[in-house]
Amino acid sequence: MQLTESHARSFVKAAQDLEPHIHAAQEEMDRERKIPDHLARLVDKAGIYQLFLPASMGGPQLHPVIAYQAMEEVSRVEASVGWCGLLSNGGALFTGNFTPEAARRMFGNPPEFRCAGSFRPLGESCPVPGGYRVNGRWDYASGIANANWLFINSRVVDDDGPRLTEAGRPDTVMLFTPMETATVYDTWHVVGLCGTGSNDFVLEDVFVPTERSFRLYDPPLEPGFLYHPRTLLIAIWVLVSAVALGAARGAMDAFKELASGSGTTISTTLLRDRPHVQSKVGEAEAMISGARAYLLDAMNRAWDSFSEDMPLPSPDIAQARLAITQSIHQAARSVDILFHAAGTNAIHRRNGLERRWRDVHVVVQHGAGLLSNYEFGG
């Protein structure tokens, strides 16, 4: 069932309402290097982990621009919470390869869906009657401390070794498995996005039934923009932009508060009253707002031009890819400008600016920020 616009936008309001709860948990998040359970329950209740879950499975199946706005609001307060949300929604997009009946058996009705996992084909899956036996170790499983399902990508092997496709490439299969089938290893000691708990996990001789498996580039069972092989990537990557631009907006908020009450060690003049600082703030604001406008316009155009049999190439998809990568880099540059404009004030944790600086420079390392995406658009 299609959501009304007011119901869809209620997810943005629910994300905004999380702000005081996220603020209250930030110290614990840094200390424990994960989202605390009590906060994860509130994030789950707000629907942040399943914005892209298909309506046929009981999910909201949001327009990507509405999902962007919800994730941006969360990330403005704390990028780690937004990052775990985007990874779970990556898993939600993959459920478009399951039948609604299989999904209800997996996630329940109404669905309980908090997903983590890894897109890297690091493990091995051996075909057996009724499914696969899976072994391996995967990394960067953001949000795994609060997940109830894992998605994994793995190489298909048999008694003769790794299988190859008709094109001669390694055959891979995507699988979903319950969280309790994995062993988690504490490996997340990093400079930014500290609260995501993006640890490694291991599966040892885990059986995954066929109905929980699919080939990544097979035609999905769910129709529509979110699940189509040619648009699925920009659907999830727009949420990477949401985390980056949300963090940049949070940095601007933190800077304005700092500038209204602080000078520097060499001058008592408030930062807000210095022409040089005003110029830098204007430059950063133009970067953030300009990148956001380009991004949302490009995503709306891609959505409006979508069809199941869309032709190749698609200028609208290329523009969306460009806008995503550009927005991530502009977010990082804008935070750099604010960080340096704040002087020594910027390095103190109490000001909130250094947190956004660390986080956005981890976000830009994601595949959505690769410079090769400019080449694709060109």
Image (cartoon, rainbow, N blue to C red):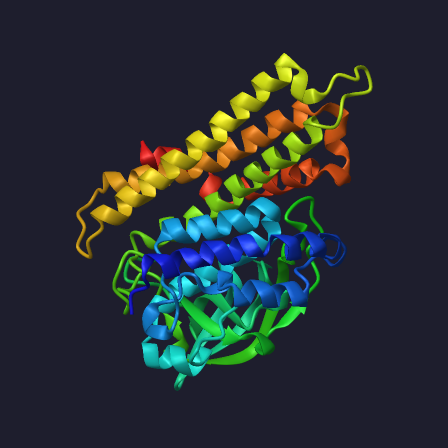
Between 293 and 183, the one lying in front of the other is: 293
Q: Position of residue 202 (x, y in %)?
A: 61, 69
Residue at image position (48%, 55%) is: 13
- The image position of residue 231, as x and y in percent, is 31, 52
Residue lying at 23% horizontally and 42% vertically, measured from the top left? 314
Q: Looking at the rendering, in which quadrant would you find the N terminus?
A: bottom left
Q: Horizontal and vertical percent for residue 361?
A: 60, 38
Depth check, front residue: 227 or 347? 347
> Position of 365 compared to 161: left or right?
right
Residue 284 occupies quadrant:
top right
| Residue 14 percent across, percent down from the top left | 51, 58
Tell whether 29 sits left or right of 120.
right
Q: Quadrant of residue 171?
A: bottom left
Tell me: 113 left or right of 294: right
Residue 369 located left or right of residue 257: left
In the displayed structure, 132 sits above or below 372; it is below
Task: Give 146 or 371, whichever is nearer the viewer.
Answer: 146
- Vertical placement of 171 versus 102: above or below? above
Furthest residue toward right: 265
As drawn, the residue found furthest toward the bottom would be 129
Q: Is residue 101 above or below residue 28?
A: below
